[in-house]
Amino acid sequence: MLCFGTVFRAGLLAMSLMVAGLPSTGMAGGTKDMLRAEQATLFEAMSGDLRNLDLMFRYAGVSARLQDYEAAISTLERMLVFDPTLARVRLELGVLYFNIGSYVIAERYFREVANDPDLPDPVRARIALFRGEIAARTRRHRFSGRVEAGPVHDSNAGLVPTDRQALLFGRRATRTGDLSESDTGGRVLAEVTHRYDWGGQGNEYWRTDATFFGRRYEDVDEGSSESLFIRTGPQLALDDTLFGARLRPFVDASHVRADDRRLYTEGAVGAEYAQVLNGKLSAFGSVRAAIRNHASRRSDEDGALFDVTAGLAWTPMRDLVLTGAVGAGSDRARADFESNSDVSLRLAASFDYDPGVVIADEKWRLSGYVSVTYRAYDAPNPVVTARETRRDTDLRLGIRHVFAFRRGFYAALDASVLDRKSSISNFRLDNIGVSAALGYKF
């Protein structure tokens, strides 16, 4: 029989590494191959000695480090069949079920272990942390979000065209004066998510997201803007598996102001889809149809918008996520010269790492993206030229580093580039932006 205290001390590090959401180091390819070889050897040894609890426990530990949670759980459950008094095994099962999101079962195992009057204080304290997190994650109403604010600087704060050559009624003209103006200001971002768990199967809930973003400059008033976006809809499970396909139909609305005046209001319906394909790969997609109404009663830009996106997210190692997505859209505006269609490609990556500093209680994150969008308009704009139809190509790049501190506080640095090439010089522009922020997430 395994002694609880001895096994606890031997397995404390392994248990800490298995905790979902806590900092951990990535696993090198060589280490993973060695663990897989060890797992295969232990499995063969167990096959010849079906009642050897030590072999079972070692096999479960190696499987957990490989994130083969099903193998680890089934092995530990079999150990309890042979000896139901193994408190350490119940504790490990609680951690494993917590990691895969089975909070009801995890709570049951943690409660059984916590009822032991001889439980060491460090173990009791760790179980209390788990149970507190389970209580937070299983509340019917859950709020989460973040707020951040800080300075911003843009080389083209008003996003005005930067080419001196222009067309007006088909004739070439040369712009004079400053085409773009750099400026410094401030920005604020607030995001709030509410989840209502109606107690259904498959981790289903109603989710509402709200985002406010504001930006102000010292001199360039036309670059100042505020936007409010709200999306709500149910998160539905399409099968009975915990990490199976998910569908979220939604409705959303947005209101945008620029230069202290209403720019446009938008309402939409759509759906989001997500599915875990295997331990490293997941798929996602969305469709959306919207109606946009500008401040002007008969704006040429009023009309309907349609968008579709599909992509894959790949996790080659625990702390690295690579994402690729393709999209297509159509803007059916009131005027043909404002109607357009576009296709886009976006690649993104994020990497979490342990900074090794005492001020951080979670990993720091470095992320970046690059996107290319090609947009073709339906007809020439007669005010510009009646002979040429506008074609744009937008190149966007961005990088962000988040420095997490303690208790939800963090700092962030951002840099972005926008380069728009257009078949008509009137619409060519570029901008380089940098910003910093202090934030808090809850």
Image: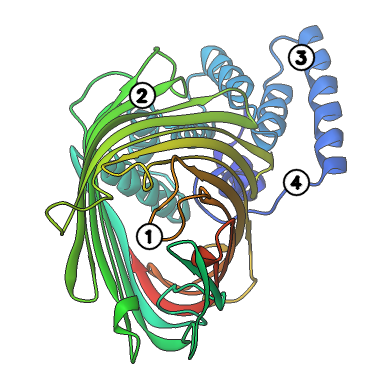
Q: Amino acid at mark 2?
A: Leu
Decide: is 396 above or below 235: below
Which dot marks residue 247?
2
Which of the two residues, 123 or 265, is positioned nearer the viewer here?
Answer: 265
Q: Residue at x 38, y 51 (%)?
A: 129
Q: Which residue in the protein does label 3 denote?
A: 46
The percent coordinates of residue 10 (x first, y second) are 67, 46
Q: Quadrant of residue 221?
A: bottom left
Query: In the structure shown, which secondary structural element does the residue marked by tag 3 occupy?
Result: helix
Among numbered discs 2 and 1, the one appearing first in the sequence: 2
Q: Which residue in the protein does label 4 denote?
A: 27
Which of the two residues, 352 or 336, is positioned nearer the viewer here?
Answer: 336
Closest to the camera, between mark 1 and mark 4, is 1
Query: In the structure shown, which secondary structural element does the residue marked by tag 2 occupy?
Result: strand
The percent coordinates of residue 345 (x first, y second) are 60, 42
Q: Quadrant of residue 395?
A: bottom right
Closest to the camera, between mark 4 and mark 3, is 4
Among numbered discs 4 and 2, the one appearing first in the sequence: 4
Q: Residue at x 33, y 91 (%)?
A: 218
Among numbered discs 1 and 4, the one appearing first in the sequence: 4
Q: Which residue in the protein does label 1 denote?
A: 383
Q: Residue at x 40, y 52 (%)?
A: 381
**Image quarter in which the N terminus is found:** top right
Q: Amino acid at mark 3?
A: Met
Work out which residue is located at the far left of the displayed protein and give it.
Answer: 297
* Residue 147 appears in the figure: yes
Q: Amino acid at mark 1?
A: Val
Among numbered discs 3 and 1, the one appearing first in the sequence: 3
* Residue 207 appears in the figure: no
